[in-house]
Image (cartoon, rainbow, N blue to C red):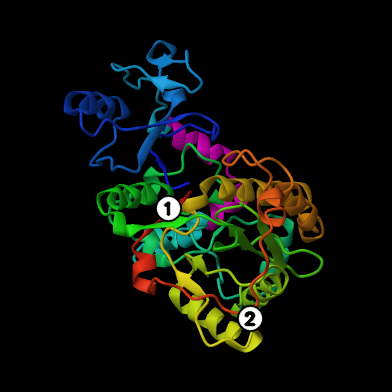
């Protein structure tokens, strides 16, 4: 998540990724010369995977694959050949649709309006075209983590056509990993910008994933809550990405586990405001429980990747009834050893002796301080 793969012809998301040598000008020029991109400069988010390096440039002696000091990528598929292969693997009907709509969209299209980059209807409004519903049920649509559009428009990100060639094309990742790295670097320089997560069920992360293939029960989105400390995950299918559905899932979780300090989310700010309005009535509270944070999820990157993998497997194996199998998948996540903590989330949350808090908990940080701080799990 958060990295931008910058070469054609790579379809292996499990490869090791390496950042560009931005601070070694001579070596960087060699990388760019071999890539043969025109009018493009890599950012600190740009990476290449190990498939673009000859074996002699890779050091596999340790636990992780590393680049040797003089490593230069030399294995690249020509752009023209990659485009031809992509055209051959694209269904003819989709190619015809692309050609017919290209002329009408050329004047207004931006990286944020490319097919698959954003949900067709993030608010879950009804679609009046029945043929479109038939097509959606026949062919699984792309999905992504719903987030504030401001994150997509960060100027330091490469253009959309430079990214995601080394990642599976059925998932649109949220760009927060490397952004969070810079935030942590800033926090190290300013200790006041660090919020320590020292206890379970203090800081939660809220995400909405979709749209997914519509199930027999009418569900098209997944709402997830994850605890930054224990890595516990709560997930629920919802019929549409509406604030009342998201708020109901949060309220049901709080009734069972108690109030956290707050819930961080990268959802659009107007949606967060609507969710808080719904929560005030459902939980009879006067404070805003959900707070916008641009890097929510990056504090617990491993868990987010596990949730992404879980959702992807559900859609692939049970496209018509993935919502039925969702509780079992979430149960498995919470009762297996987590790669970061080396413990089961169930043990850290439910066996630690913590008692649920049934009233809103006071925060010693303002919303602005939270938004500008990096959360560090201790």
Q: Which residues are magenta?
A: 81-97
**274 above or below 348?**
below
16 vs 338: above or below: above
Task: Decide which of 165, 109 is in the foreground and name it.
Answer: 165
- Work out whether mark 1 precedes mark 2 in sequence or the reverse, and give the earlier one: 1
Work out whether residue 342 can be spotted. yes
Residue 109 visible to the viewer: no
Residue 176 tag number: 1
Which residue is painted at 50% across and 62% down in the image? Answer: 118
Q: Quadrant of residue 153?
A: bottom left
Q: Residue furthest top?
A: 56
Q: Nearer the viewer, residue 87 or 244?
A: 244
Q: At 45% from the left edge and 33% from the top edge, which residue is drawn?
A: 82
Q: Is residue 332 above or below residue 213?
A: above
Q: Position of residue 291 (x, y in %)?
A: 46, 72
| Measured Cα–Cα span from mark 1 to mark 2 | 26 Å
Look at mark 2 in the image and give the residue it sits on. Answer: 244
- In which quarter of the view is residue 46 placed? top left
Secondary structure beneath dot 1 equals: loop
Q: Name the dominant secondary structure of the magenta segment.
A: helix
Q: Residue 93 lies in magenta, yes or no?
A: yes
| Disc sitting over residue 39 in the figure | none
Residue 286, compared with residue 171, is above or below; it is below
Depth check: give the residue in front, 189 or 310. Answer: 189
Q: How many numbered discs?
A: 2
| Left/right of residue 111 with respect to residue 142 in the rendered view | left
């Amino acid at each position: 998540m958060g990295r931008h793969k910058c070469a054609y012809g790579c379809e292996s998301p499990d490869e090791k990724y390496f950042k560009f040598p931005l601070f070694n000008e001579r070596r960087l020029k060699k990388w760019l010369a071999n890539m043969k991109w025109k009018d493009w400069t890599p950012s600190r988010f740009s990476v290449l995977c190990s498939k673009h390096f000859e074996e002699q440039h890779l050091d596999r002696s340790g636990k992780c694959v590393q680049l040797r000091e003089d490593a230069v990528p030399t294995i690249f598929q020509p752009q023209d050949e990659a485009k031809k292969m992509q055209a051959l693997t694209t269904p003819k009907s989709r190619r015809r649709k692309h050609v017919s709509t290209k002329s009408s969209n050329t004047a207004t299209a931006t990286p944020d309006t490319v097919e698959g980059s954003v949900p067709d209807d993030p608010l879950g409004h009804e679609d009046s075209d029945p043929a479109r519903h038939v097509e959606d049920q026949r062919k699984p649509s792309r999905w992504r983590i719903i987030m504030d559009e401001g994150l997509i428009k960060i100027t330091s990100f490469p253009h959309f056509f430079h990214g995601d060639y080394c990642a599976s094309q059925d998932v649109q990742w949220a760009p927060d990993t490397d952004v969070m790295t810079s935030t942590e670097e800033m926090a190290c320089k300013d200790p006041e910008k660090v919020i320590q997560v020292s206890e379970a069920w203090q800081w939660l992360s809220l995400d909405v994933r979709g749209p997914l293939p519509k199930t027999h029960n009418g569900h098209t989105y997944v709402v997830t809550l994850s605890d930054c400390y224990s890595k516990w995950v709560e997930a629920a299918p919802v019929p549409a990405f509406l604030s009342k559905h998201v708020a109901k899932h949060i309220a049901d979780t709080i009734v069972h586990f108690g109030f956290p300090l707050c819930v961080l989310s990268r959802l659009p700010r107007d949606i967060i405001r609507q969710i808080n309005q719904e929560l005030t009535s459902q939980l009879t509270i006067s404070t805003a429980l959900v707070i916008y944070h641009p890097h929510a999820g990056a504090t617990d990157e491993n868990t987010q990747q596990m949730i992404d993998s879980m959702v992807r497997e559900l859609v692939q194996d049970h496209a018509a009834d993935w919502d039925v199998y969702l509780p079992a998948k979430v149960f498995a996540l919470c009762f297996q050893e987590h790669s970061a903590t080396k413990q089961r989330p169930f043990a850290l949350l439910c066996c630690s002796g913590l008692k649920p808090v049934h009233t809103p908990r006071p925060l010693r940080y303002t919303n602005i301080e939270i938004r500008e701080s990096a959360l560090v799990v201790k």
